Amino acid sequence: LFGQSKAERVLSDALASGKMHHAWLVTGGSGIGKATLCYKAAGALLAREGERGMFATGLDIESGSTTARQIMARSHPGLIVIRRPYDIKAKRFTATIPIDEVRRLRSFLSLSAGDQGWRAVIVDSADELNVNAANALLKSLEEPPPQTVFLIVSSTPGRLLPTIRSRCRTLAMEPLTTGDLRKAAQAALTAAEKPVLKEEDFTSLETLAKGSPRRLLALLEGGGLALQARLDKIFMSLPVLDVAAAHALADDLQPAAQEQKFELFYDLLFDQLIRTVRAGATGEGRSGDLALAKRLMGGGKLATYAQLWETLVRDKADAEALNLDRKSLILDTLSRLEAAARG
């Protein structure tokens, strides 16, 4: 875990005080270490006597210990992880976390805690709970058994049920600084036995990464710079959409094998819209975003683009839930973008 010493200290101090809150809502941007922090906290909670070793403070435990290996394999009897299940027939993870996943909590919470006296529940992430699953989780939060800690990951906590948020202590994590971002990316590449990150590549990707190692690696592995260049070309052509470029992009991203690049496209698109709206509203930002906002968002059209962002996020979520055609979704997205630009 890189660059999150402040958040780690909050959890370790709470554990050391003996007054650990029963539910933590761990928030912050995607890919900055929220789940990693939760697994570290679970390891510290569930560690057996002697497994803390030289680590008198913090959340670290001996890397070769039994608890550390069980946490890594998600096989510890005191740990349950709620996340999207893998659909073997469709050969992909489900779009949301269904209620059956949360119902597994019933039997888990009915068991007595082990020798360490604690149980840990990791929800990764709450943003992916469907409505019924969210309500089922709420019931467990309302009547938590003793010595049980819920560690709930969320990148968009404002979209969660207010009743879930109100029962949790929020722990906000920050994007990584340049130095920590570089260290985290290099560590991940080294662990995967891949070439080290070239300095010129890091410089190009750092701004788009927004302090997220996962985002930086996705951009690096998924051809993010080339994809951003194609997206820039589409934005520069507005208010007239380059239809040929739109169809070529949709064709490239349609195959199931291109799921990572498809997700990356929407991530970059939403980020561009956010930066442009912010530049138009505040007059601050990068020169390219300011120029784009001035050209496309004059005449009181900020609200139009803010509504466009909401619509596109909803359309994408609906398309994933219903397994709709990707090409049609992308073309519809770009058509809506053109309509907003034409005003």
Image (cartoon, rainbow, N blue to C red):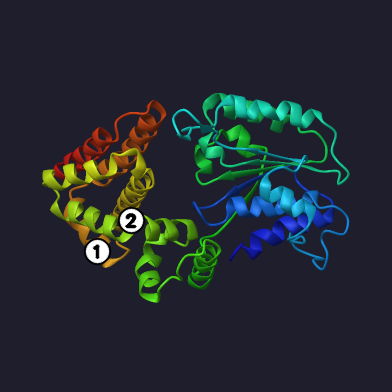
User: Residue 184, how many percent across, how many down?
Assistant: 53, 65
Q: Is residue 241 visible?
A: no
Q: Considering depth in this image, is 61 or 340 the residue closer to the camera?
A: 61
Left or right of 284 on screen, residue 164:
right
Give the residue pinned by disc 2.
275
Tell me which amino acid carries mark 2: Arg
Give x and y (percent) for residue 234.
Answer: 18, 51
User: Amino acid under label 1?
Assistant: Gly
Quadrant where the C terminus is found in the figure = top left
Residue farthest bottom in this picture: 199
Left or right of 102: which side holds 290? left
Q: Residue at x 71, y 61 (%)?
A: 9
Q: Quadrant of residue 303?
A: top left
Q: Determine whether the residue tagged by mark 1 lies in a helix, strand or loop.
A: helix
Q: Compared to 177, does 231 lie above or below? A: above
Q: Residue at x 40, y 67 (%)?
A: 206
Q: Is residue 274 left or right of residue 51?
A: left
Circle 2: element type: helix
| The label number, if any, that marks residue 107 in the structure image | none
Residue at x 66%, y 50% (from the top left corner): 38
* Residue 63, above or below 267: below
Q: Which residue is mark 1?
A: 288
